[in-house]
Amino acid sequence: MPELKALIFDVDGTLADTEKDGHRVAFNLAFADAGLDWDWTVDIYEDLLSVTGGKERMKFYLDKYTPEFTQPDDLDSYIADMHKAKTAHYTELLSKGRIPLRPGVKRILNEARDKGYRLAIATTTTPANVEALLVHTLGEESMNWFEVIAAGDIVPAKKPAPDIYDFALEKMNLKAEECIAFEDSRNGILSSLGANLKTIITTNDYTKDHDFNGAAIVLDQYGEPDSSFTVLEGDAHGFDYLNIDMIKALHSA
Ligand code: XBP
Ligand code: MG
């Protein structure tokens, strides 16, 4: 196995628990702005999360949940406008510091940087959302920590397609075997495995029952030195919180 050189992170659900109290709320605010009574409850949103990409998710909702709604002729631009409003609400929520990073994320990013590992992001969310999360949790300069921020419509085929990871690998001029991916969902791991990346999973409330077959390990969280993770599947190689040594052990296993 070639030496580990780079860590590639998903954003939503992986760096932070953004879906229930962030994206979902922002979609509902955008619907209310447009005078629509669409209510994406926590339960309905679980079903909607099967589709990645906010615009794609809205289309899926319209088809499945609002058969009585007369779709406008130019549905794509109608959805694109509403999605812009949603992004404004979402970035506003983040600017209020409403969504913290998950345990261990900041520590692992810092340790990786100290030890000279390269960092990248591969996500289906809109670039402005990634920037808002990084800036409001890690500070303005953290945007420069990531060599590549592959996000949103940069590739037409969103996760579960491997394209976003392939794009990040190509930009970094690295082989999949030199990297490891961090994901939280079934669509995420299908994408990273599709790009031949070893993948570390942390689950959340929406993804804890997903199928993570093929993962390097499945954890409930990365943990911290004083609060360990729970291993849901796989071998933790004697570690009880995720750090670079454990990531290296998983990469070379
Ligand atoms: C994240 C997504 C995104 C967000 C919403 O999935 O699917 O669509 O839910 O963001 P992953 P946008 O973590 O697998 O990348 O509305 O900006 O699309
Ligand atoms: Mg995710």
Image (cartoon, helix red, strand yellow):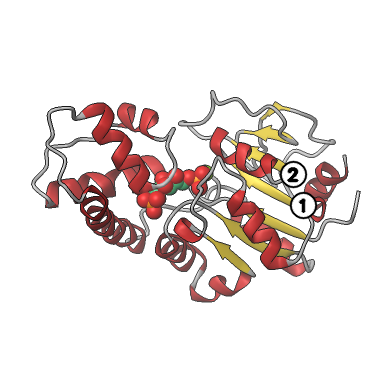
Tell me the kind of residue under disc 1: Ala
Q: Nearer the viewer, residue 116 or 147?
A: 147
Q: Considering only vertical position in the picture, is 161 above or below 156?
A: above
Q: Which residue is mark 1?
A: 176
Q: Which residue is mark 2?
A: 196
Marks 1 and 2, how far apart at CA = 6 Å
Which residue sits furthest front?
73
Q: Is residue 166 visible?
A: yes
Q: Where residue 159 sits: x, y (%)?
A: 53, 44
Q: Where residue 78 sits: x, y (%)?
A: 20, 52
Local SS, label 1: helix
Which image quadrant for residue 136?
bottom left
Q: Where residue 172 sits: x, y (%)?
A: 71, 66
Dot 1 or dot 2, earlier in sequence: 1
Tell me the kind of residue under disc 2: Asn
Q: Is residue 177 left or right of residue 22?
A: right
Residue count near mark 2 (Cα–Cα under 10 Å), binned few <14, some 14–19, many ≥20: some
Which image quadrant for residue 250?
top right
Q: Considering only vertical position in the picture, is 129 above or below 190?
A: below
Which residue is at 47% across, 62% downward?
A: 137
Which residue sits furthest left?
35
Q: Is residue 18 visible?
A: no
Q: Considering only vertical position in the picture, is 139 above or below 49?
A: below
